[in-house]
Amino acid sequence: MPVPWEALIPFALVTTMFGAAGTLFGGASRITNQGKPPRYGIDNWDEMMMERDERLTGHNRGQSVNVRAPAEFATNSIWHAQRPRTS
């Protein structure tokens, strides 16, 4: 049975484009996470620590080794809005 050689060129192009898109997407997600793998199963504690890390370093994946927080940390706290109680 003959092989339709003209069909291999579009197949190779489509395969190459899917491979390039996946590689670029993976690279972009690594760059936005500062070279760290993505986080899965994030609970409330992890969210609070990510907010704290963002306030300390400016990025939610950044961590600081300084023992004392910078002076700006005292004034840039996050105040979550609450609904007033109606009872």
Image (cartoon, rainbow, N blue to C red):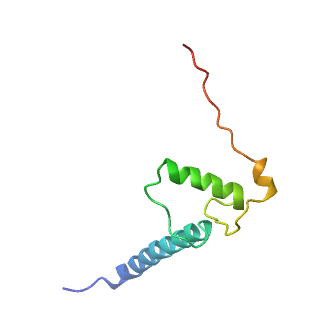
Decide if residue 58 is in sight here: no
Instruction: Give percent across and percent down for residue 41.
Output: 43, 55
Q: Residue at x 61, y 66 (%)?
A: 32
Where, quadrant-wise, is the C terminus in this rendering?
top right
Instruction: Give percent across and percent down for residue 59.
Output: 67, 61
Q: Residue at x 78, y 59 (%)?
A: 70
Q: In the rendered picture of this protein, how many numbered marks are placed on residues?
A: 0
Q: Residue at x 73, y 59 (%)?
A: 69
Q: Residue at x 69, y 43 (%)?
A: 78
Instruction: Give percent across and percent down for residue 55.
Output: 70, 54
Q: Quadrant of residue 13?
A: bottom left
Q: Of 68 and 39, which appears nearest the observer?
A: 68
Above/below status of 76 relative to 83 = below
Q: Of 42 and 7, which appears nearest the observer?
A: 42
Does 53 sit left or right of 37 as displayed? Answer: right
Does 15 sit left or right of 66 as displayed? Answer: left
Above/below status of 28 relative to 81 = below
Query: Which residue is situated farthest in the top direction here?
Result: 87
Q: Of 57 and 23, which appears nearest the observer?
A: 57
Query: Which residue is situated farthest in the left direction here?
Result: 1
Q: Quadrant of residue 33?
A: bottom right
Where, quadrant-wise, is the N terminus in this rendering?
bottom left
Decide if residue 51 is in sight here: yes
Query: Which residue is situated farthest in the right direction here?
Result: 71
Above/below status of 28 relative to 56 = below
Instruction: Give percent across and percent down for residue 77.
Output: 72, 45
